Amino acid sequence: MKQEKLTLAIIGVGLIGGSLGLCLKDKLGDDIYITGLCRTQSSMDKAMELGAVDFATNDIAKVVGNADIVFLSPPVLQIVPMVEKILPYLKKGAIITDAGSTKQYIWEHLQKILPPDIYYIAGHPMTGREKSGVTAAKKDLFVGKAYVIVEDTGAPKEAHDKLMSVLRHTGANFTTLDIAKHDRCASVISHVPHVAAAALVTLLNQSGGDMESCIKLIGGGFKDTTRIASSNADMWADICMTNGKAIAANLKTLQEIMDKVITACETQDRQAIYDYFAASKQRRDALLEDASHKFDPN
């Protein structure tokens, strides 16, 4: 007897959810059926038109009712309320996973409400673009990028194996971390750099009478270092609210580093400045060389 095709529900068919749908439809074709939850008719139409999902609606029951796997990709603070909404419609043995950039906040809340026959496996694909929405989705968005799977949420091995049999088609480089370490590392690698990029744009915005002249000088350096400042504001506000302790601690460390640079500039300590740039160049070059053999954290 032929096995029934796998059904995947995507909650939040935007950049990440849409890219997952495009990838899996490209790799698995009719062997997977993908439903998507969208808020507006135009977003439903666009998701189906682009081929990110087979069926899209704003009816939660129709999206998740037959799902083997539910992939949640809304802003972090919307994930727990969404799980509360979908729980009554999930079938026994359904697997919930997510793309949330913070994990501890989500798990602290979900473990209080999940029944024993519904499994949560925390995930975080370390990829993205400065654009948002399903129109920005790409089927190869995950290729070569780090994808964290958190294994300490109590799901059985069979559920892990089932989820990974699907996610491996993304071409991502998978790694495992415990929840607390994930949030600390994500703060250093992703969250603080986003805050810093926004700070550079804010600095330009506060340049007063020099702003027009500064804008004329904008080139690759400014564009490269501030690219991620164009990311979705809702998403990043939620990340700062749910990983605030780690982000604040690392921002304070960054502030201490900047204070040393400020002092060296004010005292004309060229050697200290040279050592600062030389050490960071050496370390970055070594890190990227090492990371190229493992993953690209973007």
Image: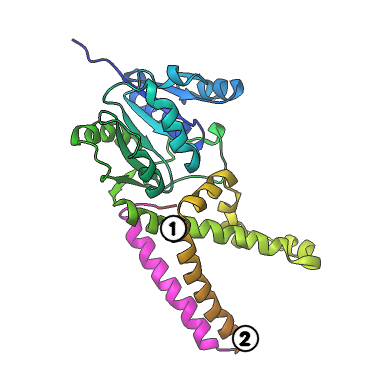
Residue 226 percent across, percent down from the top left? 59, 57
Q: Residue at x 36, y 21 (%)?
A: 29
- At mark 2, the secondary structure is helix
- Which residue is nearer to you in this view: 268 or 139? 268
Where 199 falls versus 124 (above or below)?
A: below
Where 17 falls versus 64 (above or below)?
A: below
- At mark 1, the secondary structure is helix
- Which residue is nearer to you in this view: 78 or 216? 78
Task: Indicate which disc, 1 or 2, sits on the residue closer to the N terminus.
Answer: 1
- Which residue is nearer to you in this view: 29 or 94? 94
Q: Disc 1 marks which amino acid? A: Ser
Residue 101 percent across, percent down from the top left? 43, 47
147 sits to left or right of 237: left
Q: Disc 2 marks which amino acid? A: Glu
Task: Give the total number of marks visible in the rendering.
Answer: 2
- Which residue is nearer to you in this view: 76 or 168? 76
Q: On the image, numbered disc 1 is attached to which residue?
A: 187
219 sits to left or right of 113: right
Q: Is residue 273 magenta-colored?
A: yes
| Magenta stretch bounds | 268-296
Residue 96 percent across, percent down from the top left? 34, 32
Residue 237 percent across, percent down from the top left? 55, 49
Q: Residue at x 52, y 82 (%)?
A: 273
Q: Is any atom of residue 159 visible in this view?
A: yes
Q: Is residue 159 magenta-colored?
A: no
Q: On the image, numbered disc 2 is attached to which residue?
A: 266
